[in-house]
Image: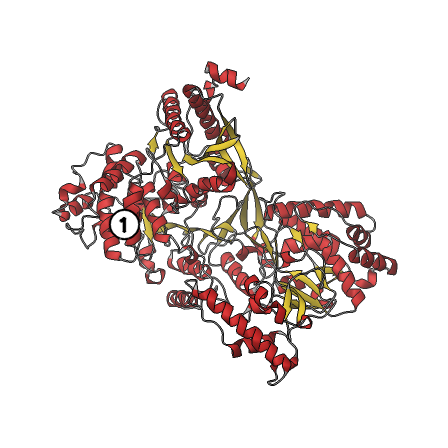
Amino acid sequence: MIRSILRKGVFNLSIIKSLPKYDDDEVRVFHPICESALNRALVNLGLEDDYEVKHHETVGSLEADFVLIRRTTGKYVLFIEVKRKPAAVSSTRYRIQAQSYVQEARSAVELPYYAITNLEVLDVFKYDNSRPSVTQQIIEPSPVRVGNFSDDPAKFFENLVGAFVKTIRIVINDQGSYKELTGSFIPMLEDNKSNRVRWHQSLVVAGYEYIRGVLNANNRRVPWRTALTYKNRPSKLIDNIKSINFNSLTLPPVPVSKDNEIWNTVMLQDIAELGQKTMSGDELAELIHSIAIAGREHEGLVPTDLELANILAILSRHELNRDLLKGEIICDPAAGSGNLLSSSKSGFQNIKPKQLWANDNEPLFPELLSIRLGLMFPTVVSPNNSPKVTEKDIIELDKDEFRDVRVVLMNPPYVSGVKDPITKKKVAARIFDINGEMSNTYVGQVGIEAPFLELVTSLVENETVISVVFPKQYLTTKGREASAFRQFLLNEFGLTTIFMYPREGIFQDVIKDTVVIIGCKNIEQKQVKVITSEIPLANIDLTKLKQGLNKLNTDSSLTSLTYGVNVRKMSTSNLEENINEGWRNLTVLGENVEKWIHDTVALNSAKLSTIHDLKRGRIGNAGASDLLFINTNNRFWYTVQDYVPVEWLYPALRTVKEIDSIFVNSSTTEVRFFAPPEESFQSGTKEYDILETILDIYIDVQSKVLANTKQRKKVKTKEELRNIINRERKKITNEYTILVPRNIRRFARIFITTEKSYVSTNVIEVTGGSIEEKWITTSWLQSIFSQLQFEGMAKDQEGTRKLEEGSIGDLLIPEIKNVSKDAMSELIKHTKNREEFLDLCNPQLFDVDKIWSEIISPSETEEALSGTLSLLEERVAERFPEYSQNVKD
């Protein structure tokens, strides 16, 4: 039926009577236009019987917006990712997202093409693992300029169909040719990353041509000739740039005329054409940024997601509750690629070029920031009206520089305080210089982001709106670092708003979950708005979100801002009361879990730490782990196994996923720990000689392995290895020790040792009490009642549940005196007979759950079970929404 309709060319033309706005819902508005255009393209090519367009196709663990499939083979030939804004088409992050569909589909791919479009602009790529960067995989004629959303809808739609016709023809004939730009400009920049002078000179010439292309496309008439015209007089090229004012490009040194690589004709022609097609600074800025940060993502150089950046600007405008006045500024003191400032128009539509200030101390960023921010305003940017770009360390900035700043948009670098204590100390010292008081957030092992935000807060004027992307764990976890930060938020920061959102598509390179926090410096608040998105950010209708925020100003009882985005208000006094325990009740679900604990478990219960002793597993931090867990290194084990006496080997738990039984013993784990007896360390004994032989073999194997790698790691000496073994062998774990994993994802693993074993630091050991008490505790830890508590107290880390010793110790367990003898016998019996772990993603009731329910809620047993199960399901789905049946753990 569908194909017959397509052949007749019958389409739902109503969807193109008007074109999208950038704020529209991506799925409901952009997707139908894209799908119709793709199908029309197939009809125009006469290929509707051979190929099929599918919407929201599941590809492995991912979901592609659209795919083109050959009907006869059922294999993919093209993946298409749809975004809302042209800047998103240029985004390296989103390009990698589109590329990941090809990688995920693997053998189901017939032709490795993928594309990304916002309908106005289309980029097409061909995957090739010998070209590691997505930018190197872009093919001609990308970028394809379809038109503007201000165009006539019918004409725009026909242009879109034409663009897809050309793309599909290239794809099915496998005629994709890589852009010349990727073959010259990118290698040139990559070679110059460590040469700041030549990096700058390269970008002056290339930036000039790109700017010229953008200005021409936007009908900005300037008397600029091609860059090559000025090769022998580069100062004139600089003068041209100064006439509009891209300041970072006009700084010395001037490009060298004899440097033919930076004056390459073909490259400059391609760059000018790129600017002409994209009509903004986003494409070149993203390209430069991706090269600059390659291999350095661990330093915190991860760009802010563009959808999140749009919402940050909208929420900031709502908080300020007015447009910027003349002379007022929006600043990003850690601007990176400029995503936050380039998205500021989403909230501040009337902003002028000179009202933007970007600062970043990364030496490879000033040029891209000048280009990107200046070209946000291609028709009006001028020497007297242009963005400000500075290249200062945050500790070098003065309060006077922030006098006119009214809004701060920021995504500070997330770097462990342990990894960078020197920078953290300098930031804390600068806070003292400004305030005359010690930093409030410079506590323990806090990450650099906390004192960084405190310093920015110290620099700005009172009542300045500060909107920042921040790790969620600072709001929810216990610990003195997090407590101190929460106190700072309620005091100096003037916390007004918390925005929480799904992790889907956001900072996939960053382990920490993030939230947006907004404050108004030193303004005391009685309530804090908690805004929660239940849907991916790309699916939020931004126009309706703005309307909802406007209504919130007059209707404080409002609970929904737009579809999928809810709001509630919490008193600051409530948050103050929970400074030390953590704000786990920010969401309705979190509040319900807390209420459940209070109503269902708290009565007649005690903390686990008051009943048992807790300590972290002890094996794993001494080094030489492949010697200690001796049979985990196959090359070494196959060589040495005949020399190792069997009585020197003990069962071991190295990683929690290696054991699929609740019991840890020689039968349930194949991993063995190497624990020679005391005689092995006494010279002249037979055991000493055996250990000598084993160590000789280990050192020989290690030396050969390192010789074939680029690692400069030094092989430990025999004496060092002997000391490690002698020290670690004494850390044996006794029978009937309960083991609670510190980090799990899907399966609620709880172990108990039934032989003496060695366990890694990946678990917390629970000891003390009688054997009977340990079995009872194990049964409780396995139950849905404990697992819901664990879910409530844990850190979310990239979908995993991370627990620390202190949190586990706070788990509530019913007092054993309230458990009857018969119930105890039943609990022990079912625990000993249990063969599988609770699947947190598909939780089912076990016998121990029913017995415990009768103990803690004898009058409402079924209600307790169903209520707990429902909350557990919701909480796990919130933590790990992307789980699938194929994910083992």
Residue 428 lies in quadrant: bottom left
Q: Which quarter of the figure is the N terminus placed in?
A: top right
Q: Which residue is mark 1?
A: 188
Residue 553 seen anywhere in this rendered image of the structure: no
Identify whether 74 is placed above or below 285: above
Q: Residue at x 52, y 77 (%)?
A: 718
Amino acid type of disc 1? Met
Residue 757 seen anywhere in this rendered image of the structure: yes
**Position in image of residue 490 (x %, y %):** 51, 57
- In this view, the residue in front, 440 or 629, is 629
**Position in image of residue 493 (x %, y %):** 46, 56
By what rule are the colours in the image chosen? secondary structure
**Position in image of residue 313 (x %, y %):** 42, 43
Q: Is residue 4 left or right of residue 203?
A: right
**Position in image of residue 430 (x %, y %):** 38, 66
Q: Is residue 401 left or right of residue 114?
A: left
- In this view, the residue in front, 138 or 803, is 138
